[in-house]
Amino acid sequence: MIETKSETLLGKLIWVGAPFASVFLLTGPVTDPVNITKLVATGALGGALLLVFLGFGIQDSWKVSRLPIISVIVFNLASLNASINSSSPFLQNLFGTYGRNTGFIAYLALTCIYVGSLMLRSTKSFQRLIQGLIIAGVLNLTYCSYVLLFGDFINWQNPYGSILGLFGNPDFISAFLGIFATTCLTFVMRPGQANWIRLLGIIAFAVSVMEIKKSHAIQGLVVTVAGIALIGYFLVRSKFEKRIIETFYAIVVTAIGVLAIFGTLQKGPFSFVYKRSVSLRGTYWRAGLKMGMDHPFTGVGMDAYGDWYRRARPPIALIDTPGINTTSNASHNVVIDFFAFGGWPLLVAYLALLLFAVISIVKIMRRNRKYDATFVALTSAWACYELQSIISINQIGLALWGWLLSGALVAYEVATRENSFVTEPKSKKPVRIHKQNQVISPTLLAGVGAIIGILVTASPFNADAKFKSALDSRNLNNVENSLTPTFYNFSDSYRFGIAVQTLYNSHFPDLALKYARLGVKFNSENFSAWQQLYSLPNSTEAEKKEAKQNLQRLDPLNPDVTKQ
């Protein structure tokens, strides 16, 4: 049985660490204030949870959650296989592309969070997880309200003209607020709930819906409506013993959902929900599916979608949506992303993890028809995340909730079995423990794990900070030093591209050519790198010829790859 002390600590780590990792951003020293900062925070949380799990929870968790743990191992092996066999740079596979950072390291951290959540057993730990989600929601809600009332105090570029939240994107904040609004509603609808909690929940729900509308992103509305429908099902199920009523409710909701799906395709009475971005996603999905089908056992590599998009996009993408010059580095569908990244092995492993969450939900529902607010909150939030994940990009601050909730649902099924719940001790009497645990405590392991997690994930942050500092200094030596590769200052196609453009505009054509050459050497699959080499006036004829050949290889459907 899992030791109470370690399980309690793990619950507290999630309570504090998950909302912190989800909302953490830093605008001053780096060019990317959102993704690389959340990667470091997620790495710290994942490292802490993993070491506590390995030290104090693996035996018990292996007995009751063997298949989910095996699936996590397979997922990481498939990710590593994709990274090793990718034609894109290995370092890019490890840390991901600029502005995404969803490479092997990011998913390793997320799977660590998943296995850590399998240790949860006490009611309070599950409640702390939900409280953590609510804390992250309140912080985003407050920040967005301030922006709408007084303007944005965060100094970052906002090309969208909408609220960004602490995720830096209107789609992401819209989706997260939908998840948050749904979670609040689960406690508003809880029978016997205190009136003051119900009032706060209603206010939070109303403000969330208002801010979702202000984001001008449809994701949040879709997620919120789906969440309301799911909570309604649990309420109907708890109030009526006759299954025919809940079946009728499920049929009606499903029919409306199907009509809404047809509406996104401009068919049926709900065609008003269609947005042009739906057509864009269709193209991105088709490209991602082609990548996976063409590389069934390895995929194209972790976070390598952008390197392959031009080769995989359908012909209609050049003449209709999104257009010949519009590209993407993600399929806007997490499931398809995994298929593109790692082929069938990665896809099957990920779907298995989702299936275990679904099986856990079904098992709990079979045992209990009452309205269990904790279970409804976990299930509704998880379902809302999974819904948005099939129409959006896997942003780290959002993704950690999906992985955390998936593991928590498996753990909740185990915890709610007869006599399985762990109660936290009320007294502070000393507990007899094994001799080795007197030295290696859960707190020590968590601290060591957090440090390891930070060290493993800090490379993109360090490289970006060093590059930004060099550019701000306007010192040529600093710029060149910032482009010298080390593990904590790894090369990156984005930085090479910015450096080439900056050096050429600053009248250093020879240095611009030097780094353009290094750019294509670093990543020969990067279209923009070859385009830069081709366009530089001082590149040789042989280089221009080679660049054109590679541009045609990377974008075979484009009739004029040299046109920018």
Image (tube, rainbow, N blue to C red):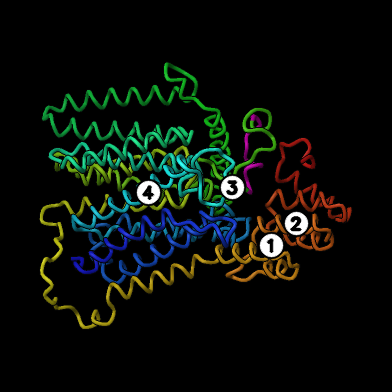
In the image: residue 285, left or right of residue 236: right
State the separation of the CA atoms marked 2 and 3. 19 Å
Q: Which residues are magenta?
A: 307-316
In the image: residue 265, left or right of residue 51: right
Which quadrant of the figure has residue 385? Answer: top left
User: Mark 2 and 3 residues: CB-CB less than 8 Å, in contact?
Assistant: no
State the separation of the CA atoms marked 4 and 3. 28 Å
User: Mark 1 and 3 residues: CB-CB less than 8 Å, in contact?
Assistant: no
Amino acid under disc 1 = Leu
Q: Which residue is mark 3?
A: 157
Instruction: Give the secondary structure at mark 2.
Output: helix
Amino acid under disc 2 = Thr
Amino acid under disc 4 = Gly
- Precedes in sequence: disc 1 or disc 3: 3
Q: Which residue is mark 4?
A: 402
Main secondary structure found in the magenta portion: helix
* Picture disc at residue 471: 1
Which quadrant of the figure has residue 522? Answer: bottom right
- Precedes in sequence: disc 2 or disc 1: 1
Which quadrant of the figure has residue 97? Answer: bottom right
State the separation of the CA atoms marked 1 and 4. 37 Å
Q: Which residue is mark 2?
A: 502
- Precedes in sequence: disc 4 or disc 2: 4
Q: Closer to the camera, 84 or 452?
A: 452
